[in-house]
Image: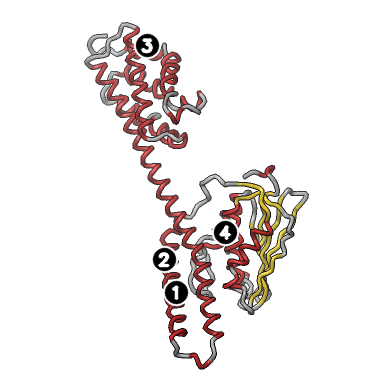
Amino acid sequence: MAGNDLSPLAMLIKRERTTLLSRWREQVKQLASARHLDIPTLNDHIPMLIDELAEALISRSDETIPEAVNGGSPPAHGMQRLQDGFDITEVVAEYNILRGCIHDLANANGLTLQGPSFHILNRILDTAIGLAVQTYATQRALEIQQRREEYLAFVAHDLRTPLNAISLAARVIELSLPAQSAGTESVHMLKTLRRNVKYLDGLVGKIIQENTASLTEIGDKLELRLLDLWPLVEALIHDLHPVGGSASTQLINQVPDDLVVYADASLLRRIFQNLIANAIDYTPRGEVTIGARELADAGMIECWVNDNGAGITADRLEKIFDKLETDTHKEGGVGLGLAIVKTFVEAHHGKVTVESREGAGSTFRFTLPASKTRDA
């Protein structure tokens, strides 16, 4: 192939497109991340790239070639390869494998890739590699940042329960000390403890505020399994005893001891933890009851957390699960607790609702799959 006539190479690529793809797949299959992929997934946008390459060669225009590639398939391919589990070196490798296959195809048909044909082919593929890798790397960075922010938001919010437990336990101890102990070293230490817990709670609140914007639906695959619900609730009540287990607030487990749910144990624990901690906060004197029952017709388990505390005003009920929604009469918090509950319940294909009347308490209900037939 002499001079600037690239038509023979373009026609060869078009005519042998199927063979070219087959040889490319054989070699790409050697990449670790490609071994498990079926043909349609493996091909992805490569057939389109081959067509774009052939058209760009026919145009023989230095201006048209980068436009054809830039507006074509490489960015979409880079995004797909991230989903397929490729690492960035494998993305580069599969394009270079295509480059080698085109060279072999040309040589086998008496076409020598040199001069303008060599440079144009390399320019097209190098541009494609750059676009694919750029898209891959950008999306990967965004996903890592998003996961980090989500993790920080969830962990920071979950820290509030043990911090509240420590603070209230210290307060209970302080109130139980005899009156004549005022001014003693023990009282000073308890006050120092509560002051530092308050400081830590402020830091946690700042982290939550900084990460609230990134709170989204759960991206990780749920680790679903059949589990007994009563022991999970009982263990959580034991952990929350310093918060709600004083003489003023009672935590009552009314979950049937033979009830089984199909859920992610870690997320389910967080759901109950947030709802119970919220109920305790609004029930300084009274009862918080945790219950559950099977909805036979629906194949679901209904769980609830009920309290006889202050209740929720009517104007807040409709937006109580919204992110950043908080009670103006309560100090601290940016309303992430119930947003997290909603996110986790919906990740299980469930639904969360609330019934409340100001001055008469609240009941939060949510549903979970009873078996694997409702796999989320």
Q: Amino acid at mark 2?
A: Lys
Q: Are marks 3 and 1 in contact (CB under 8 Å)?
A: no
**Position of residue 297 measured from the top left corner of the image (x, y, whole percent):** 77, 49
214 left or right, relative to 285: left
Task: Give above or below for 358 relative to 375.
Answer: below
Q: CA distance from mark 1 to mark 2?
A: 13 Å
Circle 1 residues within 10 Å: few <14, some 14–19, many ≥20: some
Mark 4: give few (<14), some (14-19) or many (20+) Cα within 10 Å: some
Amino acid identity at mark 4: Arg
Where does residue 265 sit, x and y in percent of width and height?
60, 53
**Dots 4, 3 in contact, CB < 8 A:** no
The tag earlier along the polypeptide, 4 or 2, is 2
**Quarter of the figure that contains the N terminus:** top left
Q: Mark 1 = which residue?
A: 198
Characterize the local packing of mark 2: few (<14), some (14-19) or many (20 or more) Cα atoms within 10 angstroms: some
- For the residues labelled 1 and 2, say whether their Cβ atoms are less than 8 Å apart: no
Residue 316 visible? The answer is no
Q: Of 357 and 343, which appears nearest the observer?
A: 343
Judged from the image, the secondary structure of the residue bearing numbered disc 4 is helix
Residue type at the position of mark 3: Leu
Residue tagged 3 = 12
Between circles 1 and 2, the one closer to the viewer is 1
In the shown orientation, is residue 100 left or right of residue 277? left
Residue type indicated by callout 1 = Lys
Q: From the image, state whether disc 4 or disc 3 is nearer to you.
A: 4
Vertical arrangement, residue 373 with respect to residue 211, above or below: above
Could you tell which of marks 4 and 1 lies nearer the N-terminus?
Answer: 1
Residue 146 shows in the view: yes
Label disc, if present, on residue 270 of the rendered structure? 4
